[in-house]
Image (spheres, helix red, strand yellow):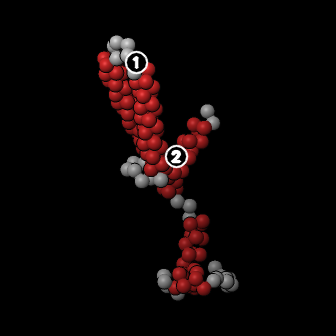
Amino acid sequence: MANQRITLELDDETMRYLSTVGKPIEVLARLAASAADGVRNHHPHRDQTDVSLRAERAETDATDSAEREVDQKQVDALVQAGRERADEDNSDRHRIDSPTAEADSVALEHERSNEDAAVGRVRAERKHLERTCLLPNATPPIAISRASARTSTR
């Protein structure tokens, strides 16, 4: 196989970075040889690995999604139980008609609204952390954007 000469212009910064790895001409020659080798020698085991990794990722995503759904249902159940207890306490206090019963009812609705907003903020913060992968077992951003694209088209 005959060698060919290629002229390449690189800026100073690129040359500095290449020189940290070795002589720039040698680094570029190794990179070119590696790229050509990758094109020449298709590796079927890599395809199999890719398929396995995709399947494993899909399984993990499904598990994580199911766990998040269970967490959300538990939060909803806790909020509902708290509301029911508050309603019982409130009804016990106001069994008889009182001039403040209506004001108390408005206050209760205001309190519920504040609690709903707080739960919404917590959920939004958790979603943000999951999107940015700051939570353990968080779904990577690309998977989140695909999932949200699927749900937004329905």
Name the residue furthest top.
96
Number of marks drawn: 2
Badge 2 local density, few (<14 within 10 Å), some, or many (20+)?
some
Residue 66 showing in the rendered view: no
**Amino acid type at image mark 1:** Pro
Pick whichever, 37 or 65, lies toward us.
65
Q: Residue at x 44, y 20 (%)?
A: 102
Q: Is residue 20 above or below residue 126?
A: below
Residue 135 showing in the rendered view: yes
Expressed as whole percent of the image width and height from the top left, the position of residue 40 reads 59, 66
Q: Is residue 102 above or below residue 127?
A: above
Which residue lies under the disc numbered 1?
Answer: 99
- Where disc 2 sits, the SS reads helix
Pick whichever, 36 or 143, lies toward us.
143
Which residue lies under the disc numbered 2?
Answer: 144
Q: Residue at x 57, y 37 (%)?
A: 151
Rendering quarter of residue 98:
top left
The reply, left or right, for residue 111 in relation to residue 10 is left
Badge 1 local density, few (<14 within 10 Å), some, or many (20+)?
few
Q: Quadrant of the C terminus?
A: top right
Q: Residue at x 60, y 65 (%)?
A: 39
Q: Residue at x 63, y 83 (%)?
A: 11
